[in-house]
Image (cartoon, rainbow, N blue to C red):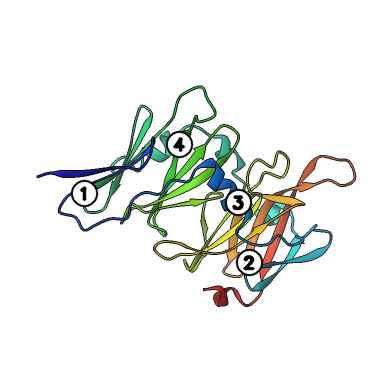
Amino acid sequence: MTKQVWKQNDFLYLYFPDQLPTMKRIISISLSLLVLFASCKEPVTTDSKVSGSDTFHLCNTVVHVDTISEAEFGATSLSDFNDTNEVKYLLPDGALVRRHADTLAFSIDGGGKAFIINDTTDSENASNYLYKGYDNVLNKYVVQGLFYEWWYHLLIDKARGDTTIVCGAPVTSPDGKYFICGNCDIDACFTFNGLELYENTSPPKLLCTKELHYWGPSQIKWHDNKTIYVHANKEDTTGGGFRMVFLRLRLGEGIEKAN
């Protein structure tokens, strides 16, 4: 029995038995395309400064923003972004995902394999991919990509091997219809600072993005299908620098119209 191995670039591969139906290849995005990806999705509009109660637009809906207490937000887990220890994720998923030195190997349904290979050179091309777990609602492996001065998250579909590059870890709505990703880079501004909203389809459908200028989402939780809690870093206009705030985003009607 012969096999097919498709090399996509220096670090992404798909591997399938030749009897399988044609599979969509893993897609990679260069640094220049990532800049385009981050800056050209949607015209930038003035976002909420979060003073009292504010609003901004996301897709076709008005989002009402107000502050909440840390106790109302609940427990935080902000250390995960800088946590390079994959063991807590690899151990429970050992039958599906393996780390072999600089390579992550993923099982794809039907006998396929997907591979991600780090670039360990001391250069601007260096890359470090970290496994961040399997999302059973999305049916996707979650991988964090760390690069010279930028980063993203990569979703690998377990059924087909398709990949989606997103700005941050996905957080799925309680009804499973949507997931939202957020990234905070309000200080250095090397990457997109804001929110991305996706419909949970195969492949995921990007509904809209919102670039933020006065605060950045460090952690996101769905409170219900119309309410999102955000642990954010906010620009401190009085003393300079940034301070931690907890926000409630109440989604108005209209997200469904973006489908």
On the question of residue 215 being in view, the answer is: yes
Give the residue type at disc 4.
Tyr
**Location of mark 4 (residue):** 129
Dot 2 and dot 3 residues touching (CB under 8 Å): no
Q: CA distance from mark 3 to mark 1?
A: 34 Å
Look at the picture and state if 238 lies above or below 171.
above
Which label belongs to residue 247?
none
Residue 248 image position (x, y, % from top left):
70, 61
Residue 129 image position (x, y, % from top left):
45, 36
Q: CA distance from mark 1 to mark 4?
A: 23 Å
Q: CA distance from mark 4 to mark 2?
A: 32 Å
Residue 42 image position (x, y, % from top left):
63, 62
Look at the picture and state if 212 lies above or below 105.
below
**Mark toward the start of the polypeptide (4 vs 3):** 3
Give the residue type at disc 3.
Ala
39 or 202: nearer the eye?
Answer: 39
Which label belongs to residue 38?
3
Q: Which label lies toward us, 4 or 3?
A: 3
Residue 172 image position (x, y, % from top left):
50, 60
**Location of mark 2 (residue):** 227
Residue found farthest to the top = 122
**Mark toward the start of the polypeptide (3 vs 1):** 3
Q: Which label lies toward us, 4 or 2?
A: 4
**Mark toward the start of the polypeptide (4 vs 2):** 4
Determine the secondary structure under disc 2. strand
Q: CA distance from mark 2 to mark 1?
A: 40 Å
Residue found farthest to the front = 32
**Location of mark 1 (residue):** 111
How many C-alpha atoms fall within 10 Å of the one at disc 4: few (<14), some, or many (≥20)?
A: many
Image quadrant in which the N terminus is located: top left
